[in-house]
Amino acid sequence: MIVGELSREALTGGLADGGLRLRTGPVVTRIQSRFPRVAEGVALHYADYTLEDTDGFADFHVRIAPPRSPRRWLKPQVYFHFDGASPFLPLPADQAFAMLEWGLNWCVSHHCHQYLIVHSAALEKSGCALLVPGAPGSGKSTFCAGLVSRGWRLLSDELTLLDFDTGQVVPLPRPVSLKNESIAAIGQFAPSATLGPPVHDTVKGSVAHMKPPTDSVRRAAERAPPRWIALPRYERGASARLTPLSRARTFMHVADHAFNYDIHGRRGFELLADIVSDSDCFEFRYGALEDAVASFDSIAGAA
Amino acid sequence: MSSPSALRWRSVAPGAIAWREWDGEYVVRNERSGNSHLLGPLAGRVLEVLLETDRALSVEDIVTALGDELAPPDTFDPHPAIDVVLSEFQRLGLAEPEKR
């Protein structure tokens, strides 16, 4: 069964009671919450995702819940609970769905050490994966949303999982997190994209999520070998420009953006070095999404 | 402290170093420190020379081992550059001077 097959009552009730076991790529998360914003966000963004049996195994057990204090009523807040603990400070209740998303990222980045985890978007075309590692503000998610809107398969927006045995990207397609000007930019660039309501005044400014394409969710079991690595940099008004980047410098950049490179020691080094060896590496500056997408469509077409 | 030129140098145990080279640039992981480093062509080749031998090498030995890879002596004196490389290797824990 997928989320979209549940009635709104069943979805709300499932989240409020025992929780729903949501599969995202290789991860199953049991999500509990009585917050309407969580139910609305799950219904909108996860409609195509598989629900596992309520008695089945879940990798993570999370709950989005109000505090046990008057803050439940006065300027309401929300906590992210993970296995009974609350690893983060509370946020305003209107950020409940964003907090769920950030919390799910935290669950994966801090626990899925069977993979090398890179803070990177990953997309697939022609059977090959493009990795887009980048710091916040680099334009990574905007670029990712732009490519997804033009037919690239979303493998991940935030957390790229790399398999140690094969070197392939293990898809973890989840909603694309857009911030500030990017929300309107994607709204204009891809009018048919499904965007959730923006939430303002978060620590990241205004945030809205883009629903992953159905095809990307359905093909979440299809892994892809990395073929290109592009370090993005958004510059207002700049024309798209791809500049080759040495593999050694690319390696250092990707290692810097890996959550658990140090944990894996030599194994992480060898995996990353193999991936960089097999990839074309670029710095990529862009100011307009149309140009950016065209540049990478051209590269993928030539592969 | 002695200048690097006056000393003989060993890399840390080869098993403690993982490295790759692409187009003359190197990435190196030092298992002892857990750190990874980006090395330029000269530093990378000096490390390779140290890793390939089981004896301590002087700067002159390293210059000899690199031979024709270095620019002609009348245009480039490699000794000061290798001194700098070895001092940096010591700081990073990639090589150390032999104790006398």
Image (cartoon, rainbow, N blue to C red):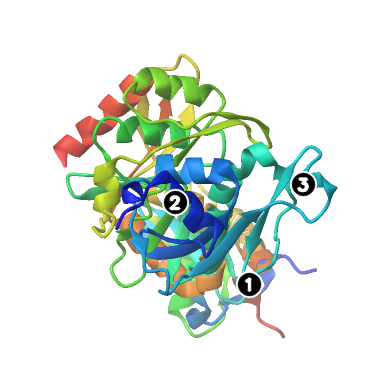
- Ranked by sequence position, the earlier of labels 3 and 2 is 2
* Residue A96 in sight in this render: yes
> Could you tell me how far apart the alpha carbons at marks 3 and 2 are, in whole angstroms?
23 Å
Please give left or right for residue A122 compared with residue A80 in the image. left
Packing grade of label 1 (10 A; few <14, some 14-19, many >=20) is: few
Packing grade of label 2 (10 A; few <14, some 14-19, many >=20) is: many
Quarter location, residue A289: top left
Which of the two marks, 2 or 1, is nearer to us in this view? 2
Above or below: residue A51 compared with residue B23: below
Please give left or right for residue A83 compared with residue A91 in the image. left
The answer to whether tags 3 and 1 share a subunit is no
Task: Please state the chain letter of the residue tagged with numbered disc 1 in the rendered image.
Answer: B
Amino acid type at circle 3 is: Arg
Above or below: residue B67 compared with residue A155: below
Amino acid type at circle 1 is: Ser
Above or below: residue A192 compared with residue A31: above
Please give left or right for residue A290 compared with residue A65 in the image. left
Above or below: residue A50 compared with residue A149: below
Question: Residue A72, labelled with which disc?
Answer: 3
Please give left or right for residue B34 compared with residue A218 in the image. right
> Could you tell me how far apart the alpha carbons at marks 3 and 1 are, in whole angstroms?
48 Å
Question: Residue B56, labelled with which disc?
Answer: none
Question: Which residue is depicted at the point 41% across and 64% down?
Answer: A27
Residue nearer the viewer, A135 or B95: A135
Question: Which residue is depicted at the point 39% across and 17% down?
Answer: A188
Residue underneath mark 2: A11
Amino acid type at circle 2 is: Leu
Packing grade of label 3 (10 A; few <14, some 14-19, many >=20) is: some
Residue underneath mark 1: B33
